[in-house]
Image (spheres, rainbow, N blue to C red):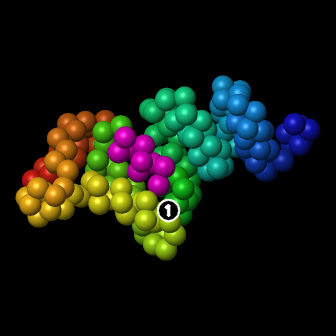
Amino acid sequence: MRGAQYTSERIGEFYNMIGNVYVLMKQPDTAIRAFEYGIGLDPTEAQLHYNVAVSYANAKRYVETIRSLETAVSLRPDYGSAHLSLAATFLSNGYPVPALLAAGRYLVLDQKTQRAATALSLFNAIMRDSPQQSRGGGPPSPVPSGKTDQGNFTAAEAVIYAG
């Protein structure tokens, strides 16, 4: 807390630590306030946006989760964790094409770790293996979402799910 009292170009990092301490203390609302305050002081700190997104997700505030993750990846395009979290959040909220794109971006950044296997699994879950489905071995194709608030992906969904 004392470090946050100083004027510093790294002030966002102090609020990131403060927010994380509140997360560990199981005080999610206070953690969110700390992260948001830090973002107000240093809006370019991608880690703050990522950590507040995780806290929003835990609070089931998915619109804010997506917005914060999108900000994190726009500030730091090589931020793998944010891309993978964005892919999972998109998919669980019914946005298959944005999820596919975020998982694909993660796989561009990382192909070798266990998290890469998770991203590939997510990617494959969206792209479904049509021959496997026709043999009855795969899950049924999902119904296209029809959602357009993240962009109109109707044509892409039609291609993916034409199976």
Residue at 54 percent of width and 29 percent of height: 59
Evaluate whether residue 109 shows in this view. no
Q: Image quadrant for the N terminus? A: top right
For this orientation, the residue located farthest to the right is 2
Q: How many marks?
A: 1
Q: Nearer the viewer, residue 41 or 28?
A: 28
- Where is residue 52 shown, x and y percent of the image? 61, 38
Residue at 52% from the left image edge and 52% from the top image edge: 82
Element type where label 1 sits in the image: helix
- Residue 42, quarter of the rendered image: top right
The image shows residue 132 at horizontal and vertical percentages of 14, 62
Q: Which residue is mark 1?
A: 115
Q: Residue at x 43, y 65 (%)?
A: 117
In this view, which residue lies farthest toward the bottom? 112
Q: Majority secondary structure of the magenta segment?
A: helix
User: What span is in magenta?
Assistant: 84-92
- Which residue does the image show at 49% across and 62% down from the upper left? 115
Classify 10 Å Cα crowding around label 1: few (below 14), some (14-19), many (20 and above): some
Q: Residue furthest top?
A: 29
Comparing 140 with 44, the one in front is: 140
Q: Is residue 105 left or right of residue 23?
A: left
Q: Is residue 159 above or below residue 114?
A: above
Callout 1 amino acid: Arg
For this rendering, which residue is in front, 158 or 132?
132
Q: Is residue 70 magenta?
A: no
